[in-house]
Structures are given as structure tokens and as C-alpha cells.
Image: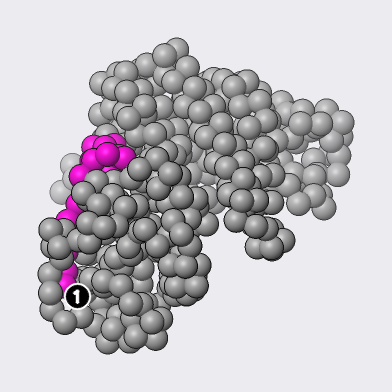
Amino acid sequence: MKQYSLLFAAALLAVGCAKPSHITVNGKVAGLNDATYFLKDAADSTIAAENISNGTFKVDAQLDNPGYGTLSINKNGSKDENNFEVYLESGEYTIEANADKLSQYPKITSPSAIQKELSSYYEIYEQTNAGTHEQRLKAEAKLNDKRSMALSKTEYIALINKVNAAQEAEDKTKIIAFKTFVEKNPQSIAAPHLMGKLDIESDPVTYNNIYQKLGAAARNTDEGKEIGAKLTRILKLVPGAEAPAIAGNTPDGKPFNKATLDKSKKGYIIDFWRAANQVSRLCHQDMINTLQKDKSGRQFGIISVSLDSKRDWWTKAVTDDHMNWPQFADLKGDDSPNAQNWMITKIPTYYLVDENWHIIERNVDFNRLLFEMDSYVKKH
């Protein structure tokens, strides 16, 4: 018994002597005074939050949750939020930011290998980006402005073209930046994490090619495996691929059968919706009042796929919204094969498929549907 007591005491002593993780941060933002900083750990718990005095700040604290955290440096009263991802480990960090360019990723010196990878990526990204992000935001602001509703169809399509061009330009810079980073750091453990923050659905083929260049250690991390599995699913939904079948029946019990599709149509809008989703319901009215009355829009049919789980909610919404086009549901909600096979992560989601049930475009923003249909009709 005495031996067990001694072992137990030794175990307690070992635990008591375990040194907790500790982090020290020396921050320098020359010329910045009326500002604050926040440092949060991997659990989103605040480690430190204080005013910046004479362009400097200091953190000397216990680090309970090492990993990917967040650093924020913001001028008081400013609407801009400058949040940066940082990898926090035990040790001493030096963070230097530019008071005139607070949106730029700061210079971070630390013993963390993963933080060094993050700094390398963001340096490459900012060199490559060169303002494309700001250009996209400006273009989208004009499109979302209420005054855009008064534009003619030609003017509205021209504005959508401008937004699309800005989005494509930004997407390309992100791909170039990430590709450059992976080429320089193929064994990077941070790469799968960074990839998870990118819109890999915008160009899954290119992102998959980059993913295949990652080292085995990176691809075999939990995040690496998750990205690999996601890419495998997305590659089945690229433009030109055969669209998945639709599970479920119409309200009167008829199953989906693509062989019965109206071949006189150029294609179909596949509308994934839910009765309790107000945006879905409002868009149904726009489909009736705008899309079905447009010359190009009339050449496309509509097929709505509900992700409801209650039959009465679904059928009542169909009646109330005057949806006079085919309706399908399997009433399995988020567990529906439709959600999984079509990779539905938000409601509403819209796909365009051609008359042969091949994907034209996936995850089309509702405001872009008319533009995409018009472009397809002109080419076909």
C-alpha cells in the first residue's frame, strides 16, 4: 500500500511540475496610438486585449490553447477590421505592422515553424493580389445597390459582367499565390489548413492539381484528408459532368426521371430550397415575375428540390408560392442524398444543367442566373 501511495504522490508531483505553455509578444506599430489589439487563441478565447500605447503593445500570458489563433489591430472608431490568422505556440513573438497599411499581414518573427509558413503564404498572397480584392468589393457594392434595379437589362448584364470579371481576377490571384506557396513549400503542414480557407469550388481541377503536389505528410493530416475528400466530391460536379439524379417524389408520388425532361428546353434551373427559408421563398416570386418572362429565361425550365422534412410545410409552401413547375422532395431534410450528392451547404442553392442533364454551372448566385442563361442560349 505504501508503494502505491508513493507512486500516486509522484504522479501528482509530476503533474504539478508540468510547465504550462507561455507566450510573449512584443508588438510594434510605429505611429499608431489611438488603437487597440486583441489576441485570441485556438479556442477563440481572448489572451490579451488592450490599447496600443506609443505604437507598441506587449503580451506576457499563459497559452492554454495553442494552435491557429487571431490577431486584431484596429484604429478606434474605424469601421475597418484588421484580423490576421496567427499560429500560437509557447515562446517569444515579435509582431511589426505598418500604421498606414493596417490591412496588410504584419511581419511576425517567432520560433513556430507553422507561423513561418503562414507568414510566407500571406507575403506571397499580398504581392500577388495587388488590389483585386478591393476591385471586387467595389463592383459587388454597385451590383447590390438598390439603384441597380432601375438599370436596363443590357446595363444590368454589363454590371454583372464587371462583377464576374473582378471575381475571376481575384480567384486567379488566390490560385497563383497558393500555387507559388506550395511550389516553395511542398511539405508545408499549414498548406491544407490554408487550402481549407480558399474557395476550392471556384476551380476544383486546378486546386486538385496543386493538392497533388503536396507532400504525403501534408495530405495525411486531418485537414489534408478532408480537403482531398472534398475535392473528390466536387470533381464529380464540374461543368460538363453528368448531374446526379434527384431523390424523392413529386407531391403526387411520382419519382424523378430525367428521361421525361422537356427536350425543347435549353436546360433547367435546379432550385434547392426549404419552406422555412425566406430567401428561397422570395426568389420563387422573382422566378415567376422575372425569369419566366425573359426571352432567355423561358428557354430554361425550373425543377425545385426541397430539403424539408415535413410534408405539410413543403406542399403548403409550393401552393402559397404558386410554383407551377416540377417539385421533388424525399423529406429527409439535411440527411437527404440530394444534399450530399449535390454538395448543398447553403439554402437556397442553384445549379444550371443542360437538356441532357449535364452540369452547366454550379452554385450560381441568384442575381447571375439570368446572365448565365442568356450567355448559354447565345452559344447554343
Relative placement, left or right, of 252 versus 68 is: left
Residue 201 location (% of width, % of height):
38, 40
> Residue 235: within the magenta?
yes
Q: Nearer the viewer, residue 67 or 4?
A: 67
The majority secondary structure of the magenta stretch comes to: loop
Residue at figure coordinates x 22%, y 56% from the top left: 263
> Residue 11: within the magenta?
no
Residue 98 location (% of width, % of height):
77, 28
Relative placement, left or right, of 211 versus 293 is: left
Relative placement, left or right, of 253 versus 174 is: left
The magenta segment is: 230-249
Residue at numbered disc 1: 250
Q: What amino acid is labelled 1 in the image? A: Thr
- Give above or below for 349 relative to 375: below
- Give above or below for 341 relative to 326: above
Name the element at disc 1.
loop
